[in-house]
Amino acid sequence: MIEKIIKRDGRIVPFNREKITLAILSAAISVGGRDRLAAERVTEDVIGRLEYREHPESYPSVEEVQDIVEKSLIEQGHARTAKAYIIYRYEHALKRAGKESITYSSENIPYKKLWFSLAWGVDNGCVLLKQVQQIIEEGRYQELVRASEEFYQGELNNAVQLILDRINDIKIIIVSGPSSSGKTTTTIKIGERLKKDGYSLVTLNVDNYYFDLKDQLRDTLGDYDYETPQAIDLELLSRHLRALLAGETVQIPYYNFKTGNREGISKEMVLGEKDILLIDSLHGMFEEMTAGIDEEKKFKLYIETLSQVKDSEGRFIRWADIRMLRRMVRDMQYRNYSPKQTLVHWHYVRRSELRYIISRISKAHFIVNSFLPYELPLMKHRLGGFFPQFINEFKDYQDREDAFRRAQRVQGIFNEIPAWADESVVPKSSLLREFIGGSGYSY
């Protein structure tokens, strides 16, 4: 019996066969498979090989186990899963070595947008956290709010103009981007503008196409991974999209998040002459979602918090940390999730973003920068009291190292800026209201 395993840093920890099964199943899901029994059979084979290896009296290493998993997958005929598993290992090896990822490379960095954002920040005196602090101390916070909202509105104006330039060809608008980037509000505002020109955005809610909970991947800590495109029934979704664009009537399923199951039909949908189908989804630019639809009929809009603000050490504030704060506030307010739950789940969010979302940013027809430089003081007021607790709780918890490091970074940001409590300065139409509440829009 295998009781212990040697980690890469030399620590000896209890052996957990379920981690092998989950790694295999995760690789299988990424290529369209969902057979847990098959993953368990491979796990059995791997454990058998481990028990009869050359020196069974010694503990196996993580690398040794992964080598055997690869071999077992190939020999049992799971070639596509084996390939996905190998790529996953290679990605993590690059990450440990501090090298560039094969899916998240310099080609995915929108340098022109970043330069524009930086230039705006310089002009408005808010490229340093220290400058944000000074703006508040000098009583100019409301000026920063107005300027930030005007900047975002300018981004929307540019996006709408590009859509109108191609309006006779476009049949589907895809609004994509990572979690809590502000896709929903951006979509609503673009819909308002197009309506003035006689066009209507008809939303297809991709959430209704999730697989039932029993078919979703769950880790050893009991957390479900809803963040991958494979959590969605992509085959059914793409079939319905093609039918809608062909003028057919489609019965849209209904997904009950309380039970975790698809239950019946939510509505029937058909497109009118001046209707444009809208896909507002994390994974809208994942190829399988819109498979079989002519690229000329698509307009792809990507939303991201492209902050160019630096801390006192000259480090840029991470876009993902900004979005995590937004999601914490939203989850707490609308989804009965605690900030701690959001934090410990965030590694799933980031893993999926890097592989399936951010890696497709170069395919977008336009990128909207949704960062609002005034939002961090508001987030500190809402969330500042939680992060010292998180740091203390996770500092010696190996399985929560990701959460610990994120908590440390956010605490560093909050240490450099004052909190702002008066949310009345935030316009009712602001994108930030999507997260803090009090919006003039219905979500």
Image: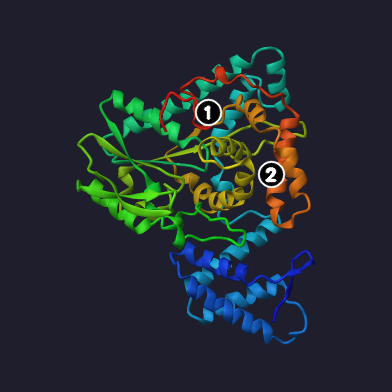
Mark 1 and mark 2: span between their CA atoms? 22 Å
| Residue at the image point whose x is 57% and y is 55% from the top | 223
**Quadrant of image for the N terminus:** bottom right
| Residue at the image point whose x is 54% and y is 77% from the top | 42
Left or right relative to 247: residue 288: right
Among numbered discs 1 and 2, the one appearing first in the sequence = 2
Is residue 105 positioned above or below 311 on the image? below
SS of the residue at dot 1?
Answer: loop
Q: Position of residue 380 (x, y in %)?
A: 67, 29
Q: Which mark is residue 432?
A: 1
**Quadrant of image for the C terminus:** top left
SS of the residue at dot 2?
Answer: helix
Q: Position of residue 401 (x, y in %)?
A: 72, 52
Question: Can see residue 315?
Answer: no
Q: Which mark is residue 406?
A: 2
Is residue 361 positioned above or below 259 on the image? above
When asked about the image quadrant of residue 273, the answer is top left
Colour scheme shown: rainbow
Residue furthest top as drawn: 139
Left or right relative to 109: residue 412: right
Q: Which mark is residue 391?
A: none
Q: Residues within 10 Å of mark 1 (few under 14, many from 20)?
A: many
